[in-house]
Amino acid sequence: MRLSFLLASLLLAPLLALGLATGTAQARPLKVAVLGDSLSAGYNLPPGQGLTRQLEAALRQDGFDVTVGDTAVSGQTSAGGLAGLDWMLGDKPDLVVVELGANDMLRGIDPKSTRANLDKILSTLKDRHIPAILAGMKAQPNLGADYVAAFDQIYPDLARQYALPFYPFILEGVALDPKLTIADRMHPNGDGVAIMVRGLKPLVAKALTTLNGNAAAGK
């Protein structure tokens, strides 16, 4: 009896070890970083109501094993985003959402500078083989027709140049709506962020699905 038990234990041990190894060798969650400003940083919102947290929750609800990093910075310009890019990439994100330019526009920064900074950000991501999604901004009409034309064209041009998934206006359906913005009528409230997430999420989900497929294929 004792011999039979010993033999059975020896036979089962490798199978148990294989099962444990299989169970613990799960892939890590995919990392999404948002290189953004106060529009995605949850400016003046309660914890959990900003874009990164709502986007992560929505993606997880759809079955994605993902984390969305709190890497957006209120007041960030395209120049600031470029300066902090290497630091952000130190966390090794699998996907980057680029949402910058609103503060450039509000400060009246030359659109040529904004374009050059965003171009450098996107070229760096391309060189490092990090997929990106570009979220656009639109200039306020009071800046003048020439400024508006030059600024608004930055985003579709770069999206075409780098063949990127493109969300043309990050505040689509939210801008200037008092029910969807905080008291300053500029930044989204929690409901406004939810609309932003609904617009942006399909692009992020598609990119994550591609990343998951590449990982499964061993690419």
Image (cartoon, grey):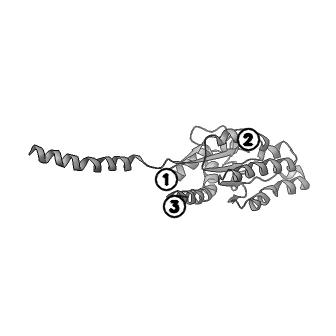
Q: Which residue is mark 1?
A: 61
Q: CA distance from mark 1 to mark 3?
A: 25 Å
Foreground: 80 or 192? 80
**As drawn, is 100 to the left or to the right of 5?**
right
Q: Residue at x 76, y 52 (%)?
A: 137
Q: Earlier in the sequence, mark 3 or mark 2?
A: 2
Nearer to us of marks 3 and 2 is 3
For the residue carrying disc 3, how many other residues have a C-alpha within 10 Å: few (<14), some (14-19), or many (20+)?
A: few
Quadrant assignment, res 167: bottom right
On screen, residue 31 versus residue 76, left or right, reads left
Whichever of labels 1 and 2 marks the residue nearer the N terminus, that label is 1
* Whether residue 171 is visible: no
Numbered circles on residues, count: 3
Kind of residue indicated by mark 3: Ala
- Is residue 9 rendered to the left or right of residue 136? left
- Mark 3 vs mark 2, CA separation in Å: 48 Å
Tag 2: Cα neighbours inside 10 Å, few (<14), some, or many (≥20)? few
Determine the residue positioned at 63% across, 46% down. 33
The residue pinned by badge 3 equals 217
Question: Would residue 13 be visible to someone looking at this image?
Answer: yes
Secondary structure beneath label 1: helix
Question: Where is residue 3 drawn, in percent x and y?
Answer: 12, 45
**Residue 139 coordinates in the image, percent (x, y):** 82, 52
